[in-house]
Amino acid sequence: MRNAYYLLILLLTWGCTLNAQWCGTSTVSEHLNDQLLSAKNQKEQITIPVVFYIVDDNPDPKIQLDYSPADLQFQLDWLNQQFADIQVYNPNQRIQFCIARANQNQAFPLPSAPDINYVEQVVEPSKQGEKGLGIFYINRDASHHLPFNDQYIHDMTGLDHSKFLVIVISESAQQGSFASYSTDIHGWSTVSSPYQHIVLLHQHLHNRPGRLNDGDVLVHEVGHYLGLAHIFQNSCQQPGDKIADTPPYSNSIANDSCEFEPRDACPGFMGSYPALRSNHMDYKGDVCRQSFSPGQAARMIAVSNHYLGPLISDQNLQAAELHCEMDISDYSPKVMYSPGLVKTAKRTWEVPNFHVYPNPAQDNIQIEIPAKYRDSEINLQIRDYSQRIVMEQSFSGTSLTIELPIQFLAAGNYILNLQAEDTHYHQGIIIQ
């Protein structure tokens, strides 16, 4: 059945090439694309580094989301399988998505926010030791009522989002009841969003109950990220979705009938256009969404070159030390950051409570030392999100409270590390 849909799309595309009647949304749309498509030959083998963040909202400091590295492997493999179809139209074109990992000189910044309890990172075992991959499991205490919005996500990751495709899998999202969203559809506005990432609700991933559970929700959102609108964009008005070979139609029909519909979807609009229900950029269920059109493939290649240069540059890809052919399904997350109560499969222990306040802070922070460490040497470090040490001090014979001037530090997010005897304590802090 899937092959039959591809054949139908190719036949329609060839028809478009031969007589330019069936599939042109408008000459306006083609003119809008002229400048953009001229960039498509800059680089047709596109590789995109990916970092996943799986966010769990519950007050208990442990990861409860049932979403394993094997599930992530499925999502990434499925994403690559769907985008491999681009080569059906042009063997020289390819878009692939690969897990980024820490390079030899630079670790990934650890996610940090005032409400984060617990962070695990998937690591790759090797002869040279374990290397952190771009896969983080995060427990945040939603009872703190911090808004889980795009700014929170951007600040929490500590990454330059122009150099990684950041995919957040979460129980909640600021966009209401949407199954997922992409913060930016590149090439549609002269004003780009300062936040560039994709958010998916975990109940819409594969093997979950429902109509959006075969892995195609992520494919749909990556299509947006690479410059595609819904194929019903602008209804029956020009310029449609700016793609010449996806026919205009008035709206997406919510039912999941996957049949190619012969009726005219936009009566009286420069010809007869049946709706293309098998396209990834429709709102049908995952079982129906099976393909991109040749025009969509060309636009994604062009958008990648024109708008995502920092992401696909050779220098960035080399720095990201990508793994494109790997099996992460058997890897296990490791505890990387645990400022509060930590729970592992083997044992549970409680870290003594160093109380750090105010947070956020401006000029000074106060650190209350547990009584058992009053006469111990306290080693303190503050690191920025690149893991660079910006402050390092030691205290001995301390009182119960340390006052730490921080007014010389630039505004932003940092990680405070404290060591006393055999105890290590970490906390994210915000300097305003």
Image (spheres, helix red, strand yellow):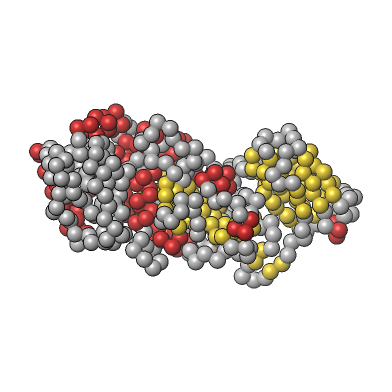
Nearer to us in this view, 309 or 362: 362
Q: Position of residue 204 (x, y in %)?
A: 41, 60
Residue drawn where x is 53% and y is 57% of the image: 55
Given the current orientation, which residue lies at the most extreme bottom position? Answer: 346
73 relative to 366, above or below: below
Does the image show residue 126? no
Question: Relative to residue 337, is residue 315 drawn left or right?
Answer: left
Residue at image coords 18%, 38%? 24
The image position of residue 409, as x and y in percent, is 70, 35
**Residue 4: % across, % down:** 17, 58
Report the residue that reaches farthest toward the left. 19
Q: Nearer the viewer, residue 218 or 277?
A: 277
Which residue is at 69% across, 63% downward? 341
- The residue shown at (36%, 42%) is 226
Query: Do we see residue 58 in this rendering?
Result: yes
x, y percentage for residue 35? 29, 28
Q: Quadrant of residue 200?
A: bottom left
- Please state, as top left, top right, bottom left or bottom right, where the C terminus lies in the image: top right
Q: Residue furthest front?
A: 268
Q: How many marks?
A: 0
Give the answer, above or below, for where 72 lies relative to 320.
below
- In the image, is 5 to the left or to the right of 175? left
Q: Quadrant of the N terminus?
A: bottom left
In the displayed structure, 16 sits above or below 52; it is: above
Q: Is residue 148 above or below residue 22?
A: below
